[in-house]
Image (tube, helix red, strand yellow):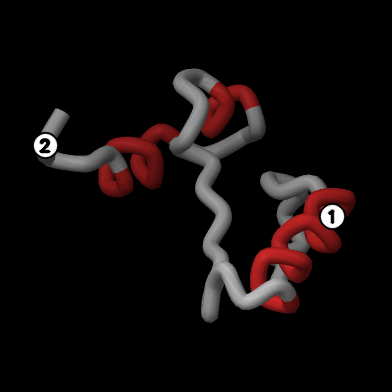
């Protein structure tokens, strides 16, 4: 599933699917939180950013 809000680049879908097809994964998830700063730069509202930030950091 790819959300239509533009936070994920649809060009990475073939790479994600390849991991499943090759048997390296049963499920693949994307995260806008992986690279510092990109979630907010991509338009994530502050309230969502704060609620998604891992409490372990």
Where's residue 22, x and y in %?
71, 72
Q: Which mark is residue 10?
A: 1
Residue at image coords 85%, 62%: 14
**On the image, which quarter does residue 30 sit in?**
bottom right
Where disc 2 sits, the SS reads: loop
Residue at image coords 54%, 72%: 25
Marked residue nearer the N-terminal end (1 or 2): 1
For the residue carrying disc 1, how many other residues have a C-alpha within 10 Å: few (<14), some (14-19), or many (20+)? Answer: few
**On the image, which quarter does residue 38 sit in?**
top right
Along the line of sight, the residue nearer the viewer: 45 or 33: 33
Which residue is disc 2 drawn over?
56
Residue at image coords 80%, 61%: 13
Residue at image coords 77%, 66%: 18
Where disc 1 sits, the SS reads: helix
- Horizontal side of 26 relative to 52 (left or right) equals right
In the image, residue 47 above or below residue 16: above
Where's residue 29, x and y in %?
53, 62
């Amino acid at each position: 599933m790819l959300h239509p809000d533009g936070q994920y680049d649809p060009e990475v879908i073939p790479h994600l699917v390849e991991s499943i097809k090759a048997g390296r994964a049963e499920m693949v998830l994307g995260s806008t939180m992986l690279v510092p700063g990109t979630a907010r730069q991509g338009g994530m509202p502050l309230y969502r950013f704060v609620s998604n930030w891992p409490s372990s950091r």
